[in-house]
Amino acid sequence: MISQWFLRFGVLFALIGMCLGIYMAATHDHTLSPVHAHINLVGWVTMFLSGLFYATYPGSQGRLAGFHLVLSVLGLLIMAPGIAGVLLGYPWGEPLAGVGSLMTLIAIVIFALIVFSAPGRQRA
Protein backbone atom coordinates (compact mmCIF):
# COMPACT_ATOMS: atom_id res chain seq x y z
CA MET A 1 0.00 0.00 0.00
CA ILE A 2 1.14 3.52 -0.77
CA SER A 3 0.46 4.60 2.82
CA GLN A 4 3.03 2.13 4.17
CA TRP A 5 5.69 3.33 1.74
CA PHE A 6 5.13 6.96 2.70
CA LEU A 7 5.34 6.08 6.40
CA ARG A 8 8.53 4.08 5.89
CA PHE A 9 10.23 6.76 3.79
CA GLY A 10 9.12 9.37 6.33
CA VAL A 11 10.83 7.49 9.17
CA LEU A 12 13.92 6.87 7.03
CA PHE A 13 14.23 10.58 6.27
CA ALA A 14 13.70 11.36 9.98
CA LEU A 15 16.71 9.19 10.78
CA ILE A 16 18.80 10.83 8.05
CA GLY A 17 17.78 14.32 9.18
CA MET A 18 18.53 13.55 12.82
CA CYS A 19 21.94 12.10 11.97
CA LEU A 20 22.78 15.23 9.96
CA GLY A 21 21.62 17.41 12.86
CA ILE A 22 23.77 15.48 15.35
CA TYR A 23 26.75 15.72 12.99
CA MET A 24 26.32 19.48 12.68
CA ALA A 25 26.04 19.87 16.46
CA ALA A 26 29.10 17.71 17.10
CA THR A 27 31.25 19.58 14.58
CA HIS A 28 29.83 23.04 15.37
CA ASP A 29 29.41 23.50 11.61
CA HIS A 30 25.84 24.43 10.73
CA THR A 31 26.47 25.21 7.07
CA LEU A 32 24.06 22.46 6.01
CA SER A 33 21.18 23.61 8.25
CA PRO A 34 18.90 24.26 5.24
CA VAL A 35 19.53 20.69 4.03
CA HIS A 36 18.72 19.38 7.51
CA ALA A 37 15.50 21.43 7.52
CA HIS A 38 14.40 20.22 4.08
CA ILE A 39 15.08 16.58 4.90
CA ASN A 40 13.09 16.87 8.12
CA LEU A 41 10.18 18.89 6.73
CA VAL A 42 9.83 17.52 3.20
CA GLY A 43 11.05 14.03 4.06
CA TRP A 44 9.95 13.23 7.59
CA VAL A 45 6.94 15.49 8.21
CA THR A 46 5.37 15.73 4.76
CA MET A 47 5.87 12.09 3.82
CA PHE A 48 4.66 10.78 7.17
CA LEU A 49 1.57 12.99 7.05
CA SER A 50 0.92 11.82 3.49
CA GLY A 51 1.14 8.24 4.70
CA LEU A 52 -1.38 8.96 7.45
CA PHE A 53 -3.73 10.56 4.92
CA TYR A 54 -3.54 7.55 2.59
CA ALA A 55 -4.09 5.17 5.53
CA THR A 56 -7.17 7.18 6.51
CA TYR A 57 -8.49 7.38 2.94
CA PRO A 58 -7.47 4.05 1.38
CA GLY A 59 -9.64 4.74 -1.66
CA SER A 60 -7.20 7.51 -2.60
CA GLN A 61 -4.28 5.10 -3.09
CA GLY A 62 -4.50 4.86 -6.87
CA ARG A 63 -2.04 5.46 -9.67
CA LEU A 64 -1.87 9.19 -8.95
CA ALA A 65 -0.80 8.41 -5.37
CA GLY A 66 2.00 6.27 -6.81
CA PHE A 67 3.22 9.24 -8.86
CA HIS A 68 3.02 11.34 -5.71
CA LEU A 69 5.24 8.86 -3.87
CA VAL A 70 7.84 8.53 -6.63
CA LEU A 71 8.09 12.29 -7.25
CA SER A 72 8.28 13.02 -3.51
CA VAL A 73 11.10 10.58 -2.83
CA LEU A 74 13.11 11.28 -5.99
CA GLY A 75 12.54 15.02 -5.65
CA LEU A 76 13.99 15.08 -2.15
CA LEU A 77 16.86 12.76 -3.10
CA ILE A 78 17.79 15.23 -5.85
CA MET A 79 16.96 18.46 -4.00
CA ALA A 80 18.89 17.78 -0.76
CA PRO A 81 22.30 17.22 -2.39
CA GLY A 82 21.56 20.16 -4.69
CA ILE A 83 20.97 22.48 -1.73
CA ALA A 84 24.15 21.14 -0.12
CA GLY A 85 26.02 21.84 -3.36
CA VAL A 86 24.74 25.42 -3.46
CA LEU A 87 25.73 25.99 0.18
CA LEU A 88 29.19 24.53 -0.41
CA GLY A 89 29.73 26.53 -3.62
CA TYR A 90 29.57 23.75 -6.20
CA PRO A 91 28.27 24.75 -9.66
CA TRP A 92 26.16 21.58 -10.00
CA GLY A 93 24.17 22.46 -6.87
CA GLU A 94 21.76 24.95 -8.38
CA PRO A 95 20.51 22.77 -11.25
CA LEU A 96 20.03 19.81 -8.91
CA ALA A 97 18.24 21.92 -6.30
CA GLY A 98 16.02 23.38 -9.04
CA VAL A 99 15.07 20.04 -10.57
CA GLY A 100 14.47 18.44 -7.18
CA SER A 101 12.39 21.40 -6.02
CA LEU A 102 10.27 21.29 -9.16
CA MET A 103 9.69 17.56 -8.72
CA THR A 104 8.69 18.14 -5.10
CA LEU A 105 6.33 20.95 -6.10
CA ILE A 106 4.64 18.73 -8.70
CA ALA A 107 4.32 16.00 -6.06
CA ILE A 108 2.56 18.40 -3.67
CA VAL A 109 0.23 19.63 -6.43
CA ILE A 110 -0.69 16.00 -7.14
CA PHE A 111 -1.26 15.44 -3.41
CA ALA A 112 -3.48 18.53 -3.23
CA LEU A 113 -5.59 17.19 -6.11
CA ILE A 114 -5.91 13.86 -4.32
CA VAL A 115 -6.82 15.46 -0.98
CA PHE A 116 -9.41 17.81 -2.46
CA SER A 117 -11.01 15.02 -4.47
CA ALA A 118 -11.17 12.57 -1.55
CA PRO A 119 -14.68 11.78 -0.35
CA GLY A 120 -15.69 13.07 3.07
CA ARG A 121 -15.44 10.66 5.98
CA GLN A 122 -18.67 8.98 7.00
CA ARG A 123 -19.66 9.23 10.65
CA ALA A 124 -20.72 6.03 12.38
Image (cartoon, rainbow, N blue to C red):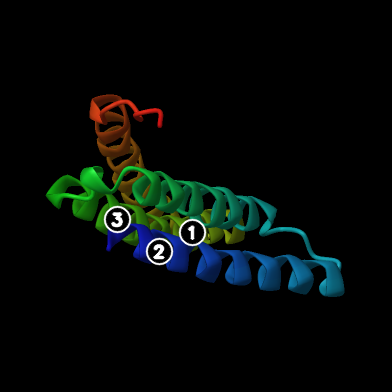
- Classify 10 Å Cα crowding around label 3: few (below 14), some (14-19), many (20 and above): many
Residue located farthest toward the left when viewing the structure as drawn: 63
Q: Residue at x 52, y 71 (%)?
A: 12
Question: Dots 2 and 1: beta carbons under 8 Å?
Answer: yes
Q: Nearer the viewer, residue 85 or 70?
A: 70
Number of numbered discs visible in the structure rendering: 3
Q: Amino acid type of disc 2?
A: Leu
88 vs 29, left or right, is left
Which part of the image, by quadrant, shows the N terminus?
bottom left
Residue 21 position by quadrant: bottom right
Amino acid type at circle 3 is Leu
Residue depth check, mark 3 versus mark 2: number of the one nearer the observer: 3
In the depicted structure, whether residue 5 falls above or below residue 75: below
* Residue located 40% across and 44% down the image: 53
Mark 3 and mark 2: Cα distance apart in space: 12 Å
Judge left or right: residue 112 versus residue 53: left
Residue 56 relative to residue 18: left or right: left
Distance in Å between CA atoms under marks 3 and 1? 17 Å
Name the mark on residue 77.
2
Instruction: Tell me the kind of residue under disc 1.
Output: Ala
Name the one closer to the observer, 79 or 85.
79
List the residue tagged with mark 1: 80
Along the viewing direction, whichever of 79 and 119 lies nearer the viewer: 119
Q: Earlier in the sequence, mark 3 or mark 1?
A: 3
x and y, in percent, of residue 89 in the image: 56, 58
Q: Quadrant of residue 5?
A: bottom left
Please identify the residue farthest to the front as the structure is shown. 124
- Left or right, 105 with respect to 67, comes to right
Q: Which residue is mark 3?
A: 69
Characterize the local packing of mark 2: few (<14), some (14-19) or many (20 or more) Cα atoms within 10 angstroms: some
Do the residues bearing badges 3 and 2 touch, measured as CB atoms within 8 Å?
no
Q: Position of residue 79 (x, y in %)?
A: 42, 55
